[in-house]
Amino acid sequence: MAVKGVVFDVTSGKEFYGRGAPYNALTGKDSTRGVAKMSLDPADLTHDTTGLTAEELKSLDNVFTKVYKAKYPIVGYTARRILNEDGSPNLDFKPEDQPHFDTKDEF
């Protein structure tokens, strides 16, 4: 699943994200808006953060850091995160810091 353009391997949380599990709707896409709003409404399962309140954005940052980055290894990034709209490389892209996971050890 992806949040804020960061793809996480949530396999270890299959009781939450696996088939038939309560948060399965969040998987397979960038569900940033849904995480920010704590919503499983299909209309909210998107990367689009337009119109989110300050409180929702704060919640998003909190959950992103204290849940996803803390529990699940980063396995990639969405194209929106690493490319500009015209397909050129995003020169401002910086990988997320996740010091407790070492990619070489994970794969």
Image: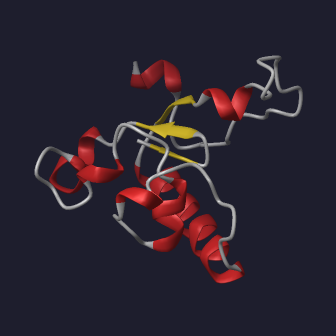
- Give the camera-side residue of 75 and 59: 59
Specify whether 7 is left or right of 40: right
Specify whether 68 is left or right of 53: left
Specify whether 4 is left or right of 13: right
37 up-or-down from 99: above or below:
below
Residue at 26 percent of width and 58 percent of height: 23
Residue 39 in the image: state x and y as whole percent: 39, 69
Residue at 62 percent of width and 53 percent of height: 48
On the image, which quarter does residue 57 sit in? bottom right
- Give the camera-side residue of 53 and 16: 53
13 up-or-down from 50: above or below:
above
Residue at 28 percent of width and 52 percent of height: 25
30 up-or-down from 22: above or below:
above
Residue 9 in the image: state x and y as whole percent: 38, 36
* Screen quadrant of the N terminus: top left
Residue 14 in the image: state x and y as whole percent: 19, 47
Farthest residue to the left: give it.
20
Q: How many marks?
A: 0
On the image, which quarter does residue 62 sit in? bottom right
- Give the camera-side residue of 48 and 6: 48
Residue at 26 percent of width and 39 percent of height: 11
* Screen quadrant of the C terminus: top left
Residue 106 in the image: state x and y as whole percent: 41, 25
91 up-or-down from 87: above or below:
below
Farthest residue to the front: give it.
43
Farthest residue to the bottom: give it.
55
Residue 92 visible, this angle: yes
